Image (spheres, rainbow, N blue to C red):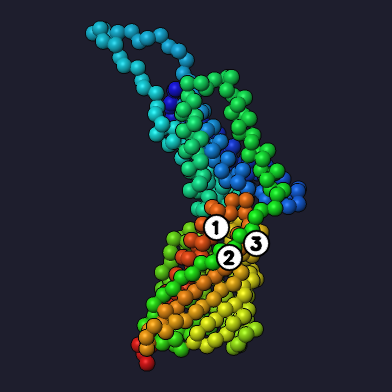
Amino acid sequence: MNANWAGVVLGAVAGALYGLGVYLWLHVLQRSSEGAAGVMVASYLFLVPFVLGLLSAALAFRPRPTLPPPEPDAFGEVRAAAQAPGLLAALGVAALSTTVFLVTALVLGFEGVLCAFLAAPVMYVMAGLGAALAYGLRRWWGRSQASALLLTAALPALLGPLEGRLAPPVIYRVVTNDVLIQAPPALVWTQIRSVPRIEDREIRAGWAHAAGLPRPREAVMSRSGVGAVRTATFDGGLSFTETVTDWQPGRLLSFRIQASDPGQLDPHVRVGGQFFDVISGTYRLEELSPGVTLLHLSSTQRVSTHFNSYAAYWTQAIMRDLQRTILEVVRDRAEAQAGRI
């Protein structure tokens, strides 16, 4: 196989253009066909990066023509023939092609940062598998294999629309966090029933916020008791209407959640959208000893995609990181207030 910079660039660009081309194709079909899921199908998430890696490695390391054996130099020595690139080189080209694709999708506004971040792990893995296959078949790449490569490349574009017409399964997941607070339940209760404006200095932002998840800002309660409404707002205009379903001062606060403004989140990860929603939330206060409270925060999420296992893993991780951030703010405020009493 012949590897050079021109081939590497060709492979990376071709792979990225292939991914973007299928992306646009599925979005066009989504607009013209009711019920289609666009790129939110397993055919796109798994097959496209696989073909991207296969295509980029195959083009980057094309077979070189058969050359006569090297002749000895003036000293009678025969120069060693250049060795063919190895598997790591093929994987590197696939990773480069995937990176070019993701960066281009971000720059063109096809995807948001959070969506690209969540898709990146599986895309790099599948692209690597495709490149590994291309490397394994390197001795057989030629004109007779071009038709097989084209057919493989067409599969995501053909299977994606068919998969998008199928209703995705719906699953529900519960995520629970807890934090130990050196303050009595009554004082902690005042910090969760209505949350005043949260400043940047109070937030220990986790990986999910670094990846594009908006930061929580406040949650204002209209009144007390069951039926009261709490409006929770985040950066970027994201907001939720939380209707109280259980009200036990100092012990339990539950509410039903409805997204009232999706903010600037990408449609693929939008709360209350077609693929993901947060249904409810509950604070439970447990007094371990006088002046010590264990605060639990749980939420229930809906995930409706064609790859629920992968999507649910990330949505649970995101909610766990978000709930940790909120609980730490409550803890710091409650302990500061307790220290002033």
Query: Is residue 174 shown left or right of residue 91?
Result: right
The image's mark for residue 301 is 2
Between 146 and 96, the one lying in front of the other is 146
Query: Is residue 8 shown left or right of residue 29?
Result: left
Residue 17 at x, y = what percent? 58, 38
> Which residue is found at the position 47% from the left and 75% from the top?
296
Crowding around mark 3 (Cα neighbors within 10 Å: few <14, some 14 to 19, many 20+) is some
> Which residue is found at the position 68% from the left and 45% from the top?
163
Q: Are marks 1 and 3 in contact (CB under 8 Å)?
A: no
Between 96 and 271, the one lying in front of the other is 271
Can the viewer see residue 59 in this picture? yes
- Say which residue label 1 marks: 312
Residue 315 at x, y = what percent? 53, 60
Q: Which amino acid type is marked by label 2?
A: Gln
Q: Answer above or below: position of 248 versus 207.
A: below
Q: CA distance from mark 2 to mark 3?
A: 12 Å
Can the viewer see residue 100 in this picture? no
The image's mark for residue 273 is 3
Between 280 and 80, the one lying in front of the other is 280
Q: Are marks 2 and 1 in contact (CB under 8 Å)?
A: yes
> Which residue is found at the position 60% from the left and 46% from the top?
42
Badge 1 element: helix
Residue 131 at x, y = what percent? 48, 34
Q: Which amino acid type is marked by label 1?
A: Ala
Q: CA distance from mark 2 to mark 1?
A: 9 Å
Q: Which amino acid type is marked by label 3?
A: Gly
